[in-house]
Amino acid sequence: MKTIVLIMATVILWNCAPRVTLGPVHLIYPEIRPIEIELKSFSFLPNHIALLENRSPYIFRLTNTANTWHNFTLIDPQKKVLLKKDLKSRESVAFDIESLDSGNYTFYCNRCLHRFLGMEGMLMVD
């Protein structure tokens, strides 16, 4: 009986969970400036980035403005982890990514439940 109650509670709570919706696309033209991403409480700003021309390397600057640790994990279309960066509260870090093939990449925070609560985004490379 406890198992049935647990399963029903899980199904009900799963349907009540917030769904990640992509914000307006943030277009990045081939420029020599960093791609700025803010890590907020359970969201990225912007969370939808389009690179219109594939010109490597890319410079990313992540800034954690929340009062808790966050993580930036980037995976390719085949779900292979390309990059993981942990950021303390109020920390900023810059790094290069040498090359990305055309496609849609997902980035998210791998901290407990952060992705589930909406901390996810998409990087589109043309």
Image (cartoon, grey):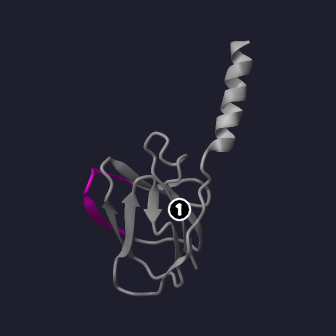
Element on which disc 1 rests = strand
Q: Is residue 25 above or below residue 122?
A: below
Q: Magenta stretch: give its range.
A: 85-97
- Where residue 82 appears, as percent x and y from the top left, is 47, 57
Residue at label 1? Answer: 121
- Name the one closer to the observer, 99 or 34: 34
- Where residue 11 appears, as percent x and y from the top left, is 71, 34
| 93 is within the stretch colored magenta | yes
- Name the one closer to the observer, 25 or 96: 25
Q: Is residue 117 above or below residue 23?
A: above
Residue at position x 56%, y 72% in the image = 124
Is residue 21 toward the left or the right of residue 100 in the image? Answer: right
- Where residue 20 appears, as percent x and y from the top left, is 59, 56
Q: Residue furthest top?
A: 1
Task: Identify the image quadrant of the C terminus.
Answer: bottom right
Residue at position x 26%, y 62% in the image = 92
Q: Amino acid at mark 1?
A: Gly
Task: Identify the image quadrant of the N terminus.
Answer: top right
- Where residue 19 appears, as percent x and y from the top left, is 62, 53
Magenta residues, dominant SS class: strand
How many labels were placed on the picture? 1
Is residue 6 toward the left or the right of residue 81 in the image? Answer: right
Residue at position x 33%, y 47% in the image = 69
| 90 is within the stretch colored magenta | yes
